[in-house]
Amino acid sequence: MNIKPKLIITFSFIGILILFSCKKNTEQDIKGTWNRVIVENAESPYTENWVFDGQYIKITRLDSTPGSNSYTADSGKYVIRSGISNKYLRTSGFKFQWFNNLDWRIERLKAGQLVLFSDRDNYSLYYEFTKQY
């Protein structure tokens, strides 16, 4: 009796379980409100919050420049996908077209920190967040 096929099936099954459990952990860990840290400009008058609820995401931005106080909000859907070595967040359904069909690589998601990276049209986006408890 050849044990190789049984080992291949067993390890394949274990690998699928590991990928599925990592995706579920990511889906749970990302839920909640995240405050974006504007790393491009530390003196930016903007504050930005992203709220993940398990299926939908709401992005709120406030301009606190004296005399401005403009407020914008948009919402759409998101899906977590797991690759072999990376996890991705795909956004869609936004009125603001920039976030539609955008794949973000989840660089870090732990200890109250979220780091997302994406390339679009030769333009790199690097967003850092801290979790609001």
Image (spheres, grey):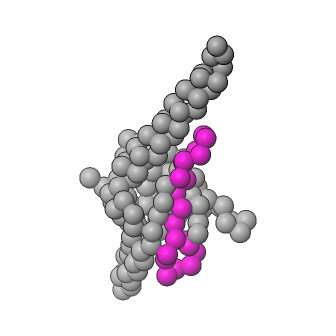
Residue 45 seen: no
Count all numbered tags in the image, as a single digit.
0
Magenta stretch, residue numbers: 81-100
For this rendering, which residue is in front, 114 or 26?
A: 26
Q: Is residue 86 magenta?
A: yes
Quadrant in which the N terminus appears: top right
* Quadrant housing residue 99: bottom right
- When the figure is inspected, residue 82 is found, relative to residue 54, above or below; the finding is above
Residue 69: x %, y % from top left: 35, 82
Residue lying at 45% horizontally and 58% vertically, measured from the top left:
37
For this rendering, which residue is in front, 98 or 125?
A: 98
Residue 44 seen: yes
For this rendering, which residue is in front, 114 or 38?
A: 114
Residue 67: x %, y % from top left: 36, 86
Q: Is residue 35 magenta?
A: no
Residue 2: x %, y % from top left: 66, 16
Residue lying at 58% horizontally and 69% vertically, measured from the top left:
101
Residue lying at 35% horizontally and 55% vertically, measured from the top left:
31
Left or right position of 123 against 126? right
